[in-house]
């Protein structure tokens, strides 16, 4: 008897969306890559899919809410038998809060990097067909080693994120990171270089080194490593033009790191370190920093900012600030504003304090609410907007290089300089994904040509021959 030809099983459609930091974006791309290599078709999160994966962030309560909102949105759009997966930091640190009936499965930070294996296993809601999702979240301390993953290309992105570190050994009173990520772990330098080489071969001209506590890179390795030495190694990878750092703690912007970045800055080397440091300052008041259990003073942090500005011409310095931390007085807030006014800072990311369950600050007295919280957030953001406008204006007339990312609706190409300035360029599609040398100019007045459509916080790039 001749057996009938069997049809191959239908490929399932998987949609993955990532919230939060650059590290989470790198992990989300790894999840997509793993699914794309298996019996799945990748589709946009807004499309109809058989499996929706939300790679969550728990840095604030609003981030948790956004993860739940996306799961509910997917459930409304999904076919009847589709599966909804909540993965990552919120599932790890706030499992109870993420067990919503719209989801089918919760995966922790270790489990999500084995997404394909978990999707192959039957999902049992609440263990017995009940209304809540199954939970597959191992305690994060049970996975002490950092898992390397290799991604040849970041789909739809001109720059690639390279995960070199995870976890944090700090104990800041407001932060749930250690609950979600565990202790600090570093990827061995050779594995970092290998992955950077693959990304360069995949066409990326810029990589961003990412980690939860990036400045702690190498402390757990034998022999001990440092972020500055890793940066120097990555800069030697053929095909890469520039390397950017994600957030680095104030105390870990070391003189060695500044020397490496200054020695390899734009104009001094074929492959260069981006003139861009993002530093989570959090407050300009020592009493608030002490309550946060930050390991520096406001004055020490300011000195490091000034040292960066002296050492690297054109450097863009950004910072995180938390407004309304429990016990922050009006005087303490004003000291923070004064710190920002005096520092050579280009932009601010401002957050209102958000209590995270399980952190010491959640039980502290003196929390702000309502109008005063909104006033402080608004005042810091307005100050940051003025700082940014001044920084962008100061770049006019300089020569730079722009990594071209996309073509905008107004017809201009849009990209970014190594020091974080958005630039509009009139040029051909062949420049997409490439680095173009330009002279930076203010935007033209209305009616003066194609480049008059750039925004006020952008510059125009005049291509250099």
Image (cartoon, rainbow, N blue to C red):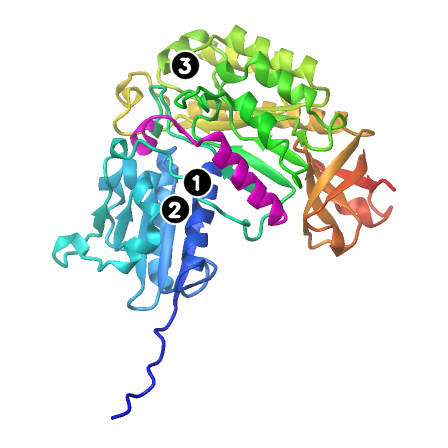
- Residue 127 lies, with reference to residue 175, above or below; the image says below
Residue 180 counted in the magenta span = yes
Between 374 and 437, the one nearer to me in the picture = 437
Residue at left offset 69%, top offset 19%: 312
Choose the circle earlier in sequence order: 1 or 2: 1
Q: How many residues crowd mark 3 within 10 Å: few (<14), some (14–19), many (20+)?
A: many
Q: Circle 1 is placed at which residue position?
A: 24
Choose the circle earlier in sequence order: 1 or 3: 1
Residue 134 in percent (x, y) is at: 21, 51
Task: Residue 421: tell me if it is visible.
Answer: yes
Between 2 and 118, the one nearer to me in the picture = 2
Quadrant (top left/top right/bottom left/bottom right) for the N terminus = bottom left
Residue 360 in percent (x, y) is at: 28, 20
Labels 1, 3: front one: 1
Residue 114 counted in the magenta span = no
Q: Circle 2 is placed at which residue position?
A: 55
Q: Secondary structure at mark 1?
A: helix
Q: Circle 3 is placed at which residue position?
A: 294
Q: Secondary structure at mark 3?
A: loop
Asked if the residue under mark 3 is in contact with the one under mark 1, i.e. CB atoms within 8 Å, the reply is no
- Residue 344 lies, with reference to residue 402, above or below; the image says above
Q: State the extent of the magenta-drawn residues as a range.
A: 178-203
Task: Residue 355: tell me if it is visible.
Answer: no
Asked if the residue under mark 2 is in contact with the one under mark 1, i.e. CB atoms within 8 Å, the reply is yes
Between 418 and 37, the one nearer to me in the picture = 37
Between 262 and 459, the one nearer to me in the picture = 262
Choose the circle earlier in sequence order: 3 or 2: 2
């Amino acid at each position: 008897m001749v057996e009938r030809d069997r049809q191959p099983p239908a490929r399932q459609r998987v949609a993955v969306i990532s919230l939060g930091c650059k590290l989470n974006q790198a992990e989300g791309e790894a999840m997509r890559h793993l699914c794309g290599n298996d019996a799945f078709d990748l589709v946009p999160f807004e499309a109809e899919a058989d499996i929706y994966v939300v790679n969550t962030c728990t840095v604030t309560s609003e981030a948790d809410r956004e993860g739940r909102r996306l799961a509910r949105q997917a459930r409304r759009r999904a076919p009847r038998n589709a599966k909804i997966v909540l993965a990552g930091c919120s599932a790890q640190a706030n499992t109870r809060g993420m067990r919503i009936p719209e989801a089918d499965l919760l995966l922790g930070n270790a489990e999500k990097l084995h997404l394909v294996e978990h999707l192959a296993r039957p999902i049992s809601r609440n263990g017995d067909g009940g209304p809540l999702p199954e939970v597959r979240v191992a305690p994060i301390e049970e996975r002490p080693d950092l898992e390397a993953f290799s991604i040849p290309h970041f789909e739809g992105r001109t720059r690639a994120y390279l995960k070199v570190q995870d976890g944090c050994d700090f104990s800041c009173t407001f932060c749930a990171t250690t609950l979600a990520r565990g202790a600090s772990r570093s990827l061995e330098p050779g594995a970092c270089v290998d992955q950077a080489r693959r990304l360069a071969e995949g066409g990326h001209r810029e990589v961003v080194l990412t980690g939860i506590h990036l400045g702690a890179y190498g402390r757990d390795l034998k022999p001990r490593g440092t972020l500055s030495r890793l940066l120097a190694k990555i800069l030697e990878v053929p095909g890469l033009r520039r390397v950017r750092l994600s957030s680095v703690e104030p105390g870990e912007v070391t003189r060695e790191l500044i020397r490496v970045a200054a020695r390899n800055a734009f104009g001094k080397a074929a492959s260069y370190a981006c003139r861009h440091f993002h530093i989570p300052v959090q407050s300009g008041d020592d009493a608030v920093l002490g309550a946060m259990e930050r390991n520096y003073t406001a004055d020490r942090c300011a000195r490091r900012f000034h040292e960066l500005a002296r050492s690297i011409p054109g450097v863009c310095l950004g910072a995180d600030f938390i407004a309304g931390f429990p016990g922050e007085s009006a005087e303490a807030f004003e000291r923070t504003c004064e710190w920002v006014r005096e520092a050579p800072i280009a932009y601010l990311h401002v957050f209102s304090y958000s209590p995270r369950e399980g952190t010491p600050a959640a039980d502290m007295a003196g929390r702000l609410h309502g109008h005063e919280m909104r006033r402080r957030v608004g005042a810091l953001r307005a100050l940051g907007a003025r700082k940014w406008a001044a920084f962008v204006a100061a770049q006019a007339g300089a020569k730079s290089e722009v990594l071209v990312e996309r073509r905008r609706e107004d017809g201009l190409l849009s990209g970014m300089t190594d020091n974080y300035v958005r630039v509009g360029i009139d040029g051909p599609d062949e420049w997409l994904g490439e680095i173009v040398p330009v002279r930076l100019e203010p935007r033209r007045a209305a009616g003066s040509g194609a480049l008059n459509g750039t925004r006020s916080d952008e510059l125009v790039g005049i291509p250099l021959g």
